[in-house]
């Protein structure tokens, strides 16, 4: 046996690597969770900005029909970071649309956020801004289909977490807020 050797044994090195691996996994999981929360908060800010911009525009316009023009909505209602090559994308990396109700007999402003996972859907439905909507519809859309094209589950009022979990599908959710 040699008693004057310097350095670490292989077992010690493997132990250190195992500890580093466990800590790295926990760090990555925490980072992923915080990024998801950040993106949901950013999406909530986008929705609030859209509503605020639309309300400001409504106050200054005598004719509401002029506001339902796609160019006006893209330039004056949507935050600039949401527009990419003339198409709307929200902070959760999904498609969105903002405009009027497709039924011309109804005077309603509509915000649609699509391509949402169940967790994203639940988080957005439980936001306080949901209470100001006259109604909310949650659709399960086929990938690439028009946002909110299918029949969906409609809800009015504030949404609890358990109710949101019941309303949201496993994937491909589109939330439609009607104001």
Image: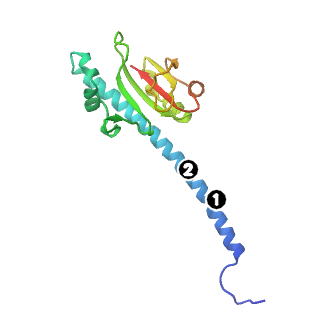
Residue carrying label 2: 30
Q: Which colour scheme is used?
A: rainbow
> Going 46% across and 38% down the picture, which residue do you hit?
40
Mark 2 or mark 1: name the one nearer the start of the chain.
Answer: 1
In this rendering, does residue 126 appear at all?
no
* Apparent side of residue 162 relative to residue 67 in the rendered image (left or right): right
- Measured as percent of width and height from the top left, residue 86 is found at 31, 35
Tag 1, which secondary structure? helix
Tag 2, which secondary structure? helix
For residue 168, above or below residue 62: below
Residue carrying label 1: 22
- Measured as percent of width and height from the top left, residue 8 is found at 67, 79
* Nearest the eye: 110 or 33: 110
Mark 1 surroundings: few (<14), some (14-19) or many (≥20) residues within 10 A: few
* Apparent side of residue 79 relative to residue 152 in the rendered image (left or right): left
Real-space Cα separation, disc 2 to disc 1, in angstroms: 12 Å
* Nearest the eye: 154 or 147: 147
> Going 74% across and 89% down the picture, which residue do you hit?
3
In this rendering, does residue 172 appear at all?
yes
In the rendered image, which quarter is residue 78 located in? Answer: top left
The mark tally for this picture is: 2
Q: Which mark is residue 52?
A: none
For residue 94, above or below residue 100: below
């Amino acid at each position: 046996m040699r008693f004057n050797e310097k350095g670490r044994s292989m077992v010690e090195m493997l132990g250190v690597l195992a500890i580093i691996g466990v800590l790295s996994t926990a760090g990555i999981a925490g980072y992923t969770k915080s990024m998801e929360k950040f993106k949901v908060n950013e999406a909530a800010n986008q929705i609030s900005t859209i509503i605020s911009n639309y309300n400001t525009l409504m106050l200054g316009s005598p004719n509401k029909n002029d506001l339902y023009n796609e160019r006006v909505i893209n330039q004056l209602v949507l935050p600039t970071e949401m527009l990419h090559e003339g198409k709307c994308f929200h902070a959760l990396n999904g498609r969105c649309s903002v405009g009027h109700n497709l039924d011309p007999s109804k005077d309603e402003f509509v915000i649609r956020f699509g391509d949402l996972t169940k967790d994203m859907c639940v988080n957005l439905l439980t936001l306080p801004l949901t209470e100001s909507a006259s109604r909310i519809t949650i659709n399960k859309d086929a990938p690439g289909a028009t946002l909110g094209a299918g029949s969906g589950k409609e809800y009015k009022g504030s949404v609890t977490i358990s109710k949101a979990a019941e309303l949201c599908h496993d994937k491909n959710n589109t939330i439609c807020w009607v104001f």
